[in-house]
Image (cartoon, rainbow, N blue to C red):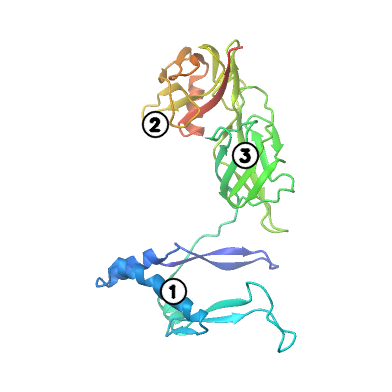
Amino acid sequence: MATIQWRPAVNALTTPKSYRIQAVSRSTDGYDEMAADISAEQPIYSEETVKGLAPLIMQWIQRRLINGSQVTLPEAFSFYVSFTGKLDSPDAPLPEGDDLLQVNVRVSQPFVKEIRHQAKLERLPLTERVPVISSTEDTLLKLKDVLNPAGVLLLTGTDLAADPQSAGNVVIEGTRNGSAVQTRLLRVEPSEMLLMPDIPAQDNSWNNEYTVTVNARYSEHGTLRTGTCSRKLRRPLTVPLSGETGILSGDEASPLASVTGGTATANELLRIQALVDSRTGQLTLRLLDMQEGGRAGAAVAITEEIEYNVLGFSNSAVESLTIAVENLAGLISLTRDNYSGRLVDVLDVRIE
């Protein structure tokens, strides 16, 4: 038999501080779970039979209440109606409003006693409510973990609620330097935030790696809680083929790799991927289109710090890019340790 789980939770309304005993539900069960369990314990009743009867029973209770009856199921529950509001005189009309009529459920003492008798309790450790950013996406490019100055950034997670009028609730910070409080918040909800990003400048053009942090206060005088997205965000890089542009780097003072040239028939927005094989440690580079799972050029194995010709994908205006790998060990380490083996930059390739 499973346990009833609980954890201590801070009671913010008491001085000195005290703790509530907070029940933690293992799951939310319904007709499907009821049918499966009853059928397993009583094989003469199929799951389909139980699943069909359960809603009919609830509809019957509902009709009885509508007809003015009280429904009492011995040693289980009593269902009855009540009213809210008051009358100024015995013959005054009923107050208007959908909440006038209430439905109540009373649990019988034998039912409660049996649960208390059989239940075993399990203590869980104290946890503090903090903002959790589970994913980030640029809604214009439809790409995750991209920080697009021309787009709108979507943050999803839990307990993200924050007052959009308060300064400092969302902060974007460069991993080398630079920090900007976000003021253009379009939507603020517990599970979702939408904002037009203000991206702080960093020392070098290849320092395009950022973190995003949400600060939230869950009550007027509550403690400020902070949550930072575990994944780094990367700003698209402008790549003129006439020059040299650092790419696929973090907070380094020198780029780990650079685009030093290439062949293209028109300007194009594409991606470059650095991938480290988890078994062999081999690093490969390839060009990708702007859709996850879309077109891809041939993978090029990177074995030393030299220039490589990385070919474009089918129907791409970029036929190839010349990539100079300037710090192979650093690029492998960044990709493997900070990006779970896959690092991707968005490149705005320009031929002018």
Residue 81, which numbered label? none
- Judging depth in this view, the residue of 20 and 99 nearest the camera is 99
Instruction: Look at mark 1 in the image and give the residue it sits on.
Output: 58
Whichever of callouts 3 and 1 sits on the residue coming sooner in the sequence is 1
For the residues carrying marks 1 and 2, which lies nearer the camera in this image?
Answer: 1
- In three-dimensional space, the C-alpha distance between marks 3 and 1, rounded to whole angstroms, equals 48 Å
| Identity, as a three-letter code, of the amino acid under mark 2 | Ser
Instruction: Give the vertical position of 205 relative to 180 (above or below).
Output: above
- Tag 3, which secondary structure? strand
Residue 278, which numbered label? 2
- Tag 1, which secondary structure? helix
- Judging depth in this view, the residue of 42 and 339 nearest the camera is 42
The x, y position of residue 7, in whole percent, is: 53, 64
Whichever of callouts 3 and 2 sits on the residue coming sooner in the sequence is 3
- In three-dimensional space, the C-alpha distance between marks 3 and 2, rounded to whole angstroms, equals 27 Å
The x, y position of residue 162, in whole percent, is: 67, 51
Identify the image quadrant of the C terminus. Answer: top right
- Tag 2, which secondary structure? loop
The residue depicted at 43 percent of the width and 31 percent of the height is 293
Whether residue 10 is visible to the viewer of this picture, yes or no, is yes
The residue depicted at 62 percent of the width and 33 percent of the height is 151
Instruction: Look at mark 3 in the image and give the residue it sits on.
Output: 212
| Identity, as a three-letter code, of the amino acid under mark 3 | Val
Instruction: Give the vertical position of 140 relative to 127 (above or below).
Output: above
| Identity, as a three-letter code, of the amino acid under mark 1 | Met
